[in-house]
Amino acid sequence: MKDTICAIATSQGVGAISIIRISGDEAIEIANKIFKGKDLKKVKSHTIHYGHIIDNNSIIDEVLVSIMKSPKTFTTEDIVEINTHGGIAPTNKVLELLLENGCRLAEPGEFTKRAFLNGRIDLLEAEAVMDMIQSKTDTQRKMAINQISGKTSDLINELRDDMVQIISNINVNIDYPEYDDIDIITTEVLTPKINNLKEKIEQILKESENGKIIKEGIKTSIIGRPNVGKSSLLNALLEEDKAIVTNIAGTTRDIVEGQISINGILLNIIDTAGIRETEDIIEAIGVEKSLKIMEEADLILLMLNNNEELSKDIQDIIDKISNKKYLVLINKIDLENKLNKEELKVDKDRIIELSITKNKGLDELKEKIQELFKLNELEAKDPTYLSNSRSISILKKCLKRVKDIEESLKENMPIDMIELDIKNIWEELGTINGSTYEEELLDEMFKRFCLGK
């Protein structure tokens, strides 16, 4: 991290302004070599200066240069940002001159990685930077800003602080048994402390289900037999003709996807091939995909045709999805009723009647989805959750280990042995916010970032 890095921080293409960012010990010196204006080495920190980028006395562009001196910067290193006119040619030329004068091209996410390694932010805050960049709804933005501000990290820090208290008490008992004013940690004393720790982790994991929904959206699968109106529903929800709609059964042979936002939460809607037995090889592959997507979905919309009698395989599908969140949509209610709802073995509040061609029932469907996932509550809350699979997976492992400690206490395992288990969990929790980390993990994580961030 001793070298000075640079990268284009704005999107490539035609625009009003492009920004080239430089960070490192020689950032100001290198920028000064190609800048005609004030001597950048003598200006105050956090100031902006007008001038020109030059190459052998030839003007490349008219620019504004921001100078930010260590340690009060994003990376805690000296940072220079060159604001050029937008456009591929001037931006690339300035970048080329910086590379020729001693900079190295930054790796993806390297500015944020340096901010982490220099102690400016922790790992959760670093991940939230990318979440903020990728946010598509206001709820995603709020969650990312809470994570960037350190509110989410506080959840993990509180858990680790509780564990440090337990570990230190046990150590004092072992090393200084003569101290009378220190609590003696026995199985009876430790059991409620471990139980309290378990409850806190379980609560964070429960809340984190909401965080995952906010970040990734609700994976919604529209399933049903051919020609019940699945593609029409997708088009109606998206308010565009995304999927091909005909009255020929088996028109949809592959998945078609789209997104809508309900109360700040994304619905990732997938229209699938009609489920039926078929000898058509291509359609059969589509049906197989439909069944797989049905298993992976967070929400299943099972569509039926009001104008057809209930087929025998529908109840089999309902049985398969009974452990998931699902709604049964009866479409084409404007046509003659041939479907007997009494034959459906589902709660009646899961049934919604639709006429997509008449635009009936869509608002009720959206309201039911909000109710099913309690989206109104999510919108009202201050979203401070773990939201990425890595963190949630680590926390689940820690929960399992805490439960193992509970069992060990019941079996009267020696306290000094239990202390080792608590220390291991404490270290594992540290990998969530980067208090403890492996270099390989950092390299893999920051590869997902864009250049210049």
Image: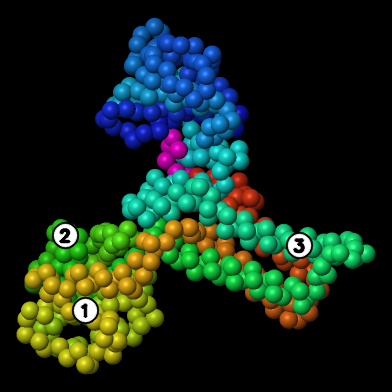
- Horizontal arrangement in the rendering, residue 238 relative to residue 161 (left or right): left
Q: Position of residue 91 (x, y in %)?
A: 35, 25
Q: Which mark is residue 225?
A: none
Between the C-alphas of marks 2 and 3, the distance is 58 Å
Q: How is the image coloured?
A: rainbow
Task: Name the residue that disc number 2 marks.
Answer: 239
Of the residues under marks 3 and 1, which one precedes in the sequence?
A: 3
Residue 127 in sight in this render: no
Magenta span dominant secondary structure: loop
86 magenta-colored: no
Q: Amino acid at mark 3?
A: Ile
State which region is magenta.
Answer: 447-453
Residue 9 in sight in this render: yes
Residue 439 vs 386, above or below: the answer is above
Q: Position of residue 404 (x, y in %)?
A: 67, 74
Is there a contact, CB below 8 Å, between mark 3 and mark 1? no
**Mark 3: secondary structure:** helix
Q: Amino acid at mark 1?
A: Ile
Q: Residue at x 41, y 47 (%)?
A: 132
Q: Residue at x 84, y 61 (%)?
A: 172
Residue sitting farthest toward the bottom: 342
Quarter of the rendering containing residue 282? bottom left
Task: Name the residue that disc number 1 marks.
Answer: 352
Q: Which mark is residue 167?
A: 3
Between the C-alphas of marks 3 and 1, the distance is 55 Å
Q: Identify which residue, 280 or 64, lies in the foreground.
A: 64
Of the residues under marks 2 and 3, which one precedes in the sequence?
A: 3
Q: Position of residue 305 (x, y in %)?
A: 15, 81
Q: Position of residue 128 (x, y in %)?
A: 47, 49
